[in-house]
Amino acid sequence: MATHLITGSGSGIGEAVARRLHERGDELWLVARDAGRAKELAARFPGARTLVADLANPDRLSWALSHQDVPDRLDSLLHIAGVSDLGPIGELTTKTWNRTLAVNLVTPAELTRLMLPQLRLSRGHVVFINSGAGLNARGEWGAYAASKHGLKALADSLRAEEHTNGLRVTSVYPGRVATPMQADVQRQEGDEYTPDKWIDPASVATTVLLALDLPRDAEVHDLTVRPGYSGG
C-alpha cells in the first residue's frame, strides 16, 4: 500500500486523484486549509489522515506541520492546489501577485523541502499539476502564468538535484479542465461556463496515476493533456 500526501483534494483534479487512490486502498494524507475543511475531507475519504495548513502562507508551513503528526515515509507528494486570478499587468496588485505566487509556487517548494526526508526514504515521486499556462503565457494571465512557469523550473531543478536519491519528478500540463476553478476563470473572462467543452478531472487523474504507476526503470518528466474532440 502506497502513501500519498495531496494538496487540493477538496475539488476538481485533486478530488479526482484522491478518489482513485482511495478506491484502490492507498493511504492518503490530505492537506486542508482549516479544521472544518479537514473534517469534511476525513468524512469524504474514510480512513484518510488530514493535515491543517494554510497554503497561502508558506512561511507558516513548517510551524503548522511541526505541531501535527506527519507520515514517516511518502511514496508520492502531489501538488494539485492552485489559484488563478486574471488581469492585465497594469492592474494587478501586489496582493494578487503575492497570493498567486505563494499558493502556486512558494508553497509547493516549501512543502517539498519539508517532505524530502520521507520521499528520499521511499525513493518517492513528486507530481506537480502545472498548466498549459506554464508553457505559454497569454495576455491577462501574467501572474498565473508566471507562477506556473516558475513551477516548471522548480520541478526541473528538483529532478536534477534528487535523481541520485531515486526520486522521480513529473510535471502535468492540463489544458482547461471542468473544475470550480475553471468556472471562476470563465467568470473572470466574461464567458459562460460550459464544462462539457473541457477535460474531465477524472481524465487528468488517469494521467497522474499513469506516471505514479510506471515501473521503476522509467520516469515521466512532462505530460501535456489537452481537451479532445467530443463529437459535439
Image (cartoon, rainbow, N blue to C red):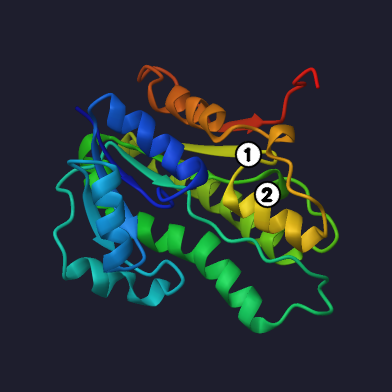
The residue at which mark 2 appears reads as 134
Q: Foreground: 134 or 155?
A: 134
Where disc 1 sits, the SS reads strand
Q: Which mark is residue 173?
A: 1
Query: Are the residues tagged 2 and 1 within 8 Å (C-beta)?
Result: yes
Residue 22 picture quarter: top left
Q: Position of residue 218 (x, y in %)?
A: 44, 20
Quadrant of the image containing the C terminus: top right
Residue found at x 74% / y 41%: 194
> As drawn, is 142 to the left or to the right of 126?
right
Q: Position of residue 109 (x, y in %)?
A: 44, 59
Residue found at x 69% / y 41%: 176
Residue 82 picture quarter: bottom right
Residue found at x 41% / y 71%: 58
Residue lying farthest to the bottom in this orientation: 94
**Above or below — where is 232 with respect to 53?**
above
Q: Position of residue 14 (x, y in %)?
A: 45, 44
Residue found at x 37% / y 54%: 112
Q: Foreground: 113 or 210?
A: 210
* Amino acid carrying mark 1 in the image: Tyr
* Amino acid carrying mark 2 in the image: Gly
**Above or below — where is 73 with respect to 61?**
above
Instruction: Note whether residue 168 is visible.
Output: no
Quadrant of the image containing the N terminus: top left
**Above or below — where is 37 with respect to 45?**
below
> As drawn, is 85 to the left or to the right of 88?
left
Q: Position of residue 36 (x, y in %)?
A: 29, 65
Where disc 2 sits, the SS reads helix
Q: Residues within 10 Å of mark 1 (few under 14, many from 20)?
A: many
